[in-house]
Image: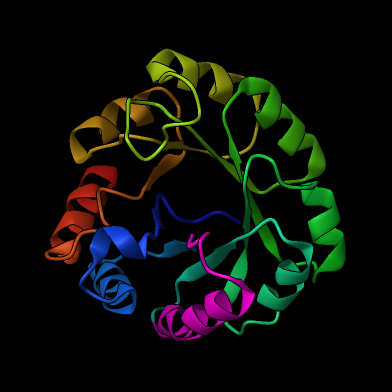
Amino acid sequence: MIDFKLYAITDRHQCAPTPLVDVVSELLDAGVTAIQLREKDLDDTELLQLAQPIAELCRNYEAKLFINTSDKVLQRSTMSIEGAAGVHLPADAESARIVKAQAEDNLCVGCSVHSLNAAEKRETEGADFVTYSPIYPTASKPGYGPAVGIEGLAKVVENVRLPVFALGGVTPARVTECLAAGAFGVAVMSGVMVSTNAKKQARRYLDTLR
């Protein structure tokens, strides 16, 4: 069951020099209940080392941790991290059905999508939710084509039954129109991966989502 509205996505480079673990702690303290660990430049060992303290934080706050990966070996490793709720698959990753078949029944699988066709495909595979991007122009999504806008978001929402999280350039001021278009919630990276006042930033999103 997807019971969160704000999906916070990590980028330790954006929040430097503040350690990522400290920023995640601030987000959880603000009330964030879902974190996606998305550190694609780390190798398997480095990612797992970083994931352990963050998983412990999420357990303490009863929050969900998702590990972003497309590597099958790493998927099996992340499933063994105590406190990880599931995995998040990039747009070019293998089938969500395959990932679920390798794991326990309660593994939650999120997927990144950039088109309606991709969203429909992930739904048929059994994904639990999708992030759809880029909704607005953003430097964080330079290789995924032009922003799809609120109209594009609404079209995806209307055609799939999965929870759809709006991603890409979503500021606190834009949350309301994303929800009005039918988004289940919003996914945010740059908006919360800041070196100072991460807690304050997260609360701005949460206040709007409430």
Residue drawn at (32%, 73%) of the image: 20
Q: Point out the residue furthest to the top here.
A: 151
Residue 199, quarter of the rendered image:
bottom left
Q: What secondary structure is the magenta-colored segment mainly? A: helix
* 86 horizontally vs 9: left or right: right
Q: Position of residue 43 (x, y in %)?
A: 59, 71
* 20 horizontally vs 111: left or right: left
Q: Is residue 26 above or below residue 126?
A: below
* 27 horizontally vs 154: left or right: left
Residue drawn at (27%, 78%) of the image: 22
Q: How many marks?
A: 0
| 48 in magenta | yes
Q: Position of residue 47 (x, y in %)?
A: 54, 74
Residue nearer the viewer, 185 or 170:
170
Residue 122, quarter of the rendered image:
top right
Q: Position of residue 67 (x, y in %)?
A: 57, 65
How are the colours assigned in the image?
Answer: rainbow
Q: Which residues are magenta?
A: 38-60
Residue drawn at (17%, 50%) of the image: 204
Q: Is residue 28 above or below residue 123?
A: below
Q: Position of residue 148 (x, y in %)?
A: 44, 18
Residue nearer the viewer, 197 or 158:
197
Residue drawn at (27%, 47%) of the image: 210
| 142 in magenta | no
Q: Quadrant of the N terminus?
A: bottom right
